[in-house]
Structures are given as C-alpha cells and as structure tokens.
Image (tube, coloured by chain):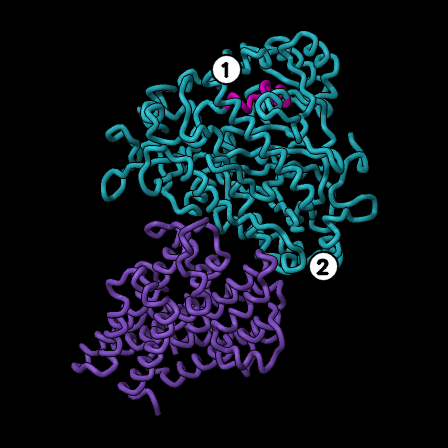
Amino acid sequence: MNTPGQFFDEMRDGAQARTPYSDYEAWFAQQNTDRLARKSQEAEAFFRRTGITFNVYGASDAEERLIPFDLVPRILSSREWTKLSRGIDQRVCAINAFLNDIYNRQEILRAGIIPVDLISRNEAFLPQMMDFSPPGEVYTHIVGTDIVRTGENDFYVLEDNARTPSGVSYMLENRETMLQMFPELFSRIRVQRVSDYPKNLRRSLESSAPASCNGRPCVVVLTPGIHNSAYFEHSFLADQMGVELVEGHDLRVVDGHIAMRTTKGYKVIDVIYRRVDDEFLDPLTFNPTSMLGVPGIMDVYRAGNITIANAPGTGVADDKAIYSYMPDIIEFYTGEKAILKNVQTFRCSEPGALRYVLDNLADLVVKEVHGSGGYGMLVGPAASRKELADFADKLRARPGNYIAQPTLSLSTCPIFTGADLAPRHVDLRPFALVSPSGVNITPGGLTRVALTEGSLVVNSSQGGGTKDTWVLED
Amino acid sequence: MFRFLERAENTARLIEAGFRIALTRSSDAESEWQSVIITSAVQPQYDARYDGYDSTRVTDFLLRDPDNPGSVLSVMKMARDNARLVRTALTTEVWSAVNETWMLFCDLLREPVPETELPHVLATIRQQSALVRGALHGTMLRNDIFDFCRLGTFIERTDSTARIIDVKYYALLPAPTFVGSRIDNVQWETLLRSVSGHRSFRWAEDGEFNAPNIARFLILDRRMPRSLSFSVAQIVDNLSYIAEEYGTRMPCHDLADDLRARLKDRDIASIFEEGLHEFISSILQDTARLGLQIEEDYRFNR
C-alpha cells in the first residue's frame, strides 16, 4: 500500500502549510479538539434536521442515510481556480459542439477522428435526436466535471458528467453548515460565494427556453419521486429556484405543449430540468414500461415547444470510451489544446491495449464504459489475487465493455478524525451552467473524500464523505 | 409588550442579514453594519459611544447594551416588565413563555457574544419569539386583550419594514432601461434577508430579481407577512375588532384607514412616481402618529 508523503497533500508541504491553507492552519492551531468534535456532531444533527439524506440502492437496512460531512474545508487559491474554470469552460463548450455535430452533420466522424462504431453502437446514442437542434443549441445545461489533482499544477479530468450530474445541493448545504458552525473563519478568510447557484440555475434554464415561448418561461424540476436516491436534491433545487417539483404523472401533452396539473387546471411549461434518465423519459419513444416519464414528450420536444435539460442523448458524450478522445474533440471544435489534462486511458476494445491491461492488471483501475457511481470497477492495487483473476475473465469475454487507467496518486486533504487531522484522498466536482447566453461556473464545487485511510474510492454510495470547497478571493 | 417582542425579533433578523452579508460579500461589511445601525434607529446613541462600524461592536450594541433602549436585552426586559404588570390578562402559557424567554436571554447575553456563537444566539431569539407567538395564538381568548397584542406586533412590524426599505430605498429605484438592468444589486439580498423573505420572494408571483418587483413585494404584496400592506391591513382589522367590541370608533380608526388607503389598490409604478423615499418617509410618520393616537384613545399613557 501507499505510504504518506508519496501523495501531494493540499494542506501541507512538509511541515509548512501551503499558501491557500495558511490562514486556516493558523486558526486550526488555536482550536480545542473537544469543541471541534462537538461541532462535528452538531453538523450531523443539522443535516438530519434539514433532511439532507440519500438512499442507497440495494441497501435493506436504514433507508435514509447521511453523507458524512468533514469540517475541514478544501481550499483552492483564486489562481488555481482561474485555471480550472477556464479548462472547464473550454470542455463544456467542446462537449456541446460535439453533441450538436454528432446529432446533425457528424463532421467529426467524417474527419475520422472518432471511430463510427463508437457512436453507432453506443447505447447512449439516441437516433431520435438526429437532425434536430434543441432550443439555443444547448445540450448540456448542467455539467459536473470530475477533477482530480496529483501535484501542484497537475489537474486531470476524470469524468465529464453530462447527463444529470448530482451533488450540487451538498455544495450549497455544506457551505451553509460551515457558515453556521464557524462564522469566525469567514470573517478572517475571504471565500468566494456559492449561494447564487440556484438563482443562476433558474436564469440559465429560462434563457434556454424555446424561441416560441412568450413572456417569462415556466420552469419545473422533474423527479422520479421520493424513492430516488437524489430526491432530497430535486426538492431542494426546486425550492431554492422557486419552481414546481413535478413527477411524470403531473405532466401531459396539451395542444402540442407540455402542461402540468395545478389546482387551477393545466398550465403550460417551457423548460423541464429533468432528473429522470433518458430511457424513462417518454414511454412512447423509449422504455414502454416507464411510469416516470411523459408520453409524447419527445414529439413536443422535436416540434420545438419544450426545452429538456439536459437534452436526451447527451450520455454519448460522457461515455468512458468517448472520454479517451476528449483531447481530440476539444481541439477539433475549439482549435485549442485542452487546458485540463485527460487521464491516460487504455481502450480494451483495441487488442494491443487489452494485452497491456491484462499484463498490468494489478496496477490499473478498470471501469465499465457505461458504468457510474463506482460500481463494477476494479481497483487493481487494492484487489486480491482471486479478484484480479475473475476480472481478467470478464475482460476477455467483453473487452469492448471496459477501459483501464493507471492508478492516479490522488491528492490528499486532511479530515478531522475526532482527535487530529489525517490525510485522505479527495476529488472535486465543480458545476457549470450552460445557456445560449454563456457558461457560468460556480467557484468551488463538491469535494468528495474517501474516509478510509488509503482508499481511493470517494463515491458516497461506497462510504465517501464530502467537504466544503473554498475558492479564496484575490 | 408585543411591540417589544416584535422589536427583539426584528433586531435579530437584521443582525442575521448584516452578519451574512459581512461574511459572504467581502468589501461591504462596514457600510452594511452602518446601515444596520441606521435601520435600528439608534445611530446617534451608537455614534456617541463608538467610532466606526464592525460586527463585534454593532452586534454587542444591538444585542446587549443596557444603554441602548432598543437592544434585545433592553426591549426584552421591558416586554417582561409589561407582562408582569398585566399578568392577569395573560394565560399562564403566554406568561411563562415570556418569562422563560427573558431568563434565557439574560443568560445567553450575560457576556459579549463571540462571533462563533452568534448564529446560535440569533436562532434562539427567533425560536423564542415563535414560542411566545405560538402560546398567544394557541391559548388566548380572542377578546380585546388579544387584539391589542396583535396591534402592537403589527405597528412595530410596519415601522420596522418601512425603516428597512427607507435605509436602502436607493437600491429599489427602477434602473435606467438602457443597459443591463438585470444586473444584481448587492443590497437586494440584504433587503430580502432582513425580512426573512429571500425564499418567499422566489415563490412570489413573478420572482424575478429586479428593483420594482422587490419593492412591490416589500410594500404591496398582501401574501408577504412582513410587507407594509399586510401589516397595515392587520392593524386595521384588529382595530375594527376593538371598535366592534367597544361599540365606538375612535380617531385612531380614521388614521389607520387613511394609512390603509395609501397602500390599497396601488401599483408600484405610481409609488415610484410619487417618490419612493417620500412615500416611505410619510408611511413612517403616519405609523408613528397612529401609534401615539392609539395610546391616547385607549388611555395607555399614565
């Protein structure tokens, strides 16, 4: 296993605090650990009382769980952030251009930059989206880019979550919790605000409304319902934006528009921020057994009478096989080199790569091309010999289903253990809003932290926690 | 007594809004604390005592200072003294809620409140206010005593909301229409937070952040429980219950009706035309006059 010191620690460089953390460290040195331990419990009580919980699929015991919150913030300097946000901006613009191209002229396939197979045999590619442009030509209204760090200036994009990224409610509530618990920190240290996110989200969605919409656009949040793991977030965002939270059965097609059931009759809506997967969106077009969607919504969509955010079929851009082509995609559409690096990725569909992956399995992380949430992946260095052998069989059986990446030396940031600080691995998911009027990225994002010593898996469904993420003012 | 209770609660809200802005918007802290002091109508007393505005001194002055007649501790003492005077007019639950609140505040505000404890202290003040209000609504006979309690609450609330608007009225003037009238004004957030209206504003009819909408929300929206229109309507209603029970109208009834007429069936454009500042100033004066008239008409002055 890895020993401390081998990883880039974001708080300490040897015995010294790194510059972004120097004020925090000075504050921390004066704290009494009993008080911090008490604060830590208060935070948990706060999350419980507010109902910030999530459900784990397949867990039979406690239905609603809390994501553990760690009270040590993750801190970025404004210079570090500027570079990150420029990189994210570039990436989301390229992803939108890519989607618009893939669903229309497919120039990138004609130019031979991406193999045709990767699109035509991709489950996330929706032929129903061909030869059609959504309102304002925006496909991914909300993007949550997963970023990891390995050194002072080394940031890598791990995944582009272009379907329905979740976690933004934790970004907001973690900050509220910190403001409540440690107000004195915020008067000493200037941190950029995140609280405008809901207002910006509503504006961004409104400006993506169909051209035919007159007056102020009506926006709703579409949720699969209270049993969904992210239901808290759906209700939270609707409430914070001041828009209705609806389920599929609240909506229907009325005179060529989508309308919602209200106590005063049906009301036409213009923009749906949907947290329902593509497959369940329209039983007439996709999964016929879906009870979560709206029959006929795809026809209304293609007629240009509703905006669906994110657009159906955006999953083709955050596929892990497409991911490996991202630097080429960025260059193709923006003419610039990618600002943020990609992690080296082996496509197991290629025989040479497959051979390399099988030979080096113990050093690699192998992921399913369409998987998410940290399920179905193999972390080579942490796997037993039997696990490695079993996984090798799976790889040989369906090589096209997997990609492999070197195990990254993820940076660490300390957590408060109850008595002391201890380094744990972290990642970062900033949130970008895209509309015809531009890209807006909230300074900060969601920092996920692996709470177990040495662990690299930060997913909340697998025991990860979260931290408040600070971007300092200049 | 309920005027004092309402005042304590409003002061807590005001500090909360100021504190948040000071923490989340770096450059505005000093001017923000200054407007909190002006809004509380205690600037002369404050300036006589301190030089410059910062969170420690402003919050201490507004929460604990015995020389500040408007501090939470001072008004709570008066509320509790009043409650003792009229002990027999109150239900046991209302009395014990007031008394417990006073004891709790004395304890909570014995020492200067460190910044680290401020959110907790402010939350307690709000919770205790809710407790007293709940006891009033749940247990009091709906007679003239109840009506006078409500009257005090809404006179104070009208005054408080009008002051909040008055101090920042310039942020609510309609922006020139040529460019970027959608640009956020930092003051809007404070205005809405000072009346705990930042969430309900988003839900109000057309929650779009711009000056006329926010001004209308704070002044004219009848659904907003701290708006001028709502508070004044409550004053008129409670006065009319008293007139009904006593069988006579008094001069204060006419004053209240006049005040109500200035807010009823108005639109925000006509108020802008009249001049927002002038409008709010006159509402403040009329509310003060109404308060005095009620005291006179019902012999609250000894």
Relative to B169, say whether A332 is above or below.
above
Which chain can be seen in purple? B
Left or right for B232, reference A311: left
Q: Which residue is mark 1?
A: A106
User: Element under label 1?
Assistant: loop
Left or right for A382, reference B53: right
Q: Find chain A in the image and tell me its colour.
A: cyan
The answer to whether residue A232 is visible is no
Residue A14 placement: quadrant: top right
Foreground residue among A450 and A222: A222
Residue B56 placement: quadrant: bottom right
Q: Amino acid at mark 1?
A: Gln
Image point (34%, 43%), residue name:
A216
Image point (34%, 22%), residue name:
A283
Q: Which residue is mark 2?
A: A32
What segment is highlighted magenta in the picture?
A315-327
* Residue farthest along the front direction in this orientation: B178
Residue A324 placement: quadrant: top right
User: Element under label 2?
Assistant: loop
Residue B131 falls inside the magenta stretch: no
**Looking at the picture, how far across and down is residue B73, in whole percent?**
51, 77
Q: Residues within 10 Å of mark 2 (few under 14, many from 20)?
A: few
* Residue farthest along the bottom direction in this orientation: B302
Image point (59%, 26%), residue name:
A334
Mark pair 1, 2: CA separation: 61 Å
Q: Residues within 10 Å of mark 1 (few under 14, many from 20)?
A: some
Relative to B275, say whether A443 is above or below.
above
